[in-house]
Image (cartoon, helix red, strand yellow):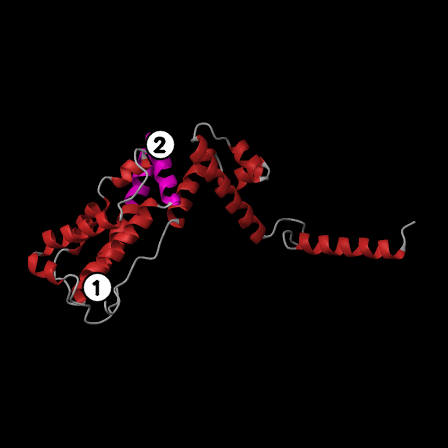
């Protein structure tokens, strides 16, 4: 026979479990939409870690389900086969890597504005999430050539578009002349990054350009793109007004 205090504790425990279960199950006893999304997000996270560490061929849906603590049929219901799961991982990894690009602010000079763009380029390129994504894409590019090409083009197009916005703002603020800002964005990205991305993604080097190297690259770009007169004023003349991209 259960005493009153114990019985009261048991009822409280059942009530707590029921409330906890209610958050994940609907009235029909099936997972709620929120719970399904939670499971899907967890599966993507686990799959990403396994694909990056083991590669595509060595990773199975059974491995993913086991590591995520869900049934294999749940993975099939959410994603279909392993190839579909891999594509979902790459897509989620790409969209999850988006960073807010820098904007021109009152008091910025041409040099300081481009320094912010360089820092943005380094963060996009060298943070752990980006390195893992690119290494995975390189490793599996022969298996999924069209898909990887499409994702890579999307990544680089967005990256250069964000850089180009700064050049549009610099022109509007009177710090650079009108010109082909798409070309300026491409040249600037190539100069400030150099060979560092491929050296990092292949594990041949591990460090991005340091501050001194970054400043030299920016000065080289300004002089080569805009000439000595603008280069001379690049650290002095400030933005005339705050602009909108």
Name the element at disc 2: helix
Name the quadrant containing residue 48.
Answer: top left
Say above or below: 18 vs 150.
below
Highlighted range, magenta: 128-154
Q: Give the prevailing secondary structure in the magenta stretch.
A: helix
Q: Of all residues shown, which one is farthest toward the top? A: 58
**Residue under pointer 2:** 139
**Residue under pointer 1:** 169
Say above or below: 193 vs 109.
above
Does residue 15 appear to the left or right of 154 in the view shown? right
Is residue 27 among the parts visible in the rendering? no
Q: In which quarter of the image is the C terminus?
A: bottom left
Is residue 55 among the parts visible in the rendering? yes
CB atoms of marks 2 and 1 within 8 Å: no
Would you call the spot at circle 1 few (<14 residues within 10 Å), some (14-19), or many (20 or more)?
A: many
Residue at 40%, 45% (x, y): give it: 93
């Amino acid at each position: 026979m259960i005493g009153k205090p114990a019985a009261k504790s048991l009822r409280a425990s059942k009530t707590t479990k029921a409330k906890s279960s209610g958050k994940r199950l609907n009235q029909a006893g099936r997972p709620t939409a929120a719970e399904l999304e939670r499971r899907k997000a967890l599966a993507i996270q686990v799959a990403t870690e396994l694909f990056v560490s083991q590669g595509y061929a060595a990773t199975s849906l059974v491995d993913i389900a086991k590591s995520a603590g869900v049934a294999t049929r749940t993975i099939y219901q959410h994603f279909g086969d392993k190839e579909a799961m891999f594509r979902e991982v790459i897509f989620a990894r790409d969209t999850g890597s988006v960073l807010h690009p820098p904007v021109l602010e009152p008091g910025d000079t041409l040099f300081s504005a481009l320094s912010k763009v360089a820092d943005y380029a380094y963060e996009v390129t060298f943070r752990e999430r980006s390195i893992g994504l690119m290494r995975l894409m390189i490793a599996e590019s022969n298996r999924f050539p069209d898909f990887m090409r499409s994702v890579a083009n999307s990544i680089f197009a967005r990256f250069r578009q964000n850089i180009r916005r700064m050049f549009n703002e610099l022109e509007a603020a009177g710090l650079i002349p009108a010109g082909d800002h798409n070309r300026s964005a491409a040249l600037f990205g190539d100069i400030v990054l150099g060979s560092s991305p491929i050296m990092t993604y292949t594990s041949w080097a591990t460090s991005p350009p340091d501050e001194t190297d970054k400043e030299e690259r920016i000065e080289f770009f300004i002089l080569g793109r805009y000439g000595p007169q603008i280069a001379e004023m690049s650290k002095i003349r400030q933005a005339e007004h705050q602009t909108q991209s």
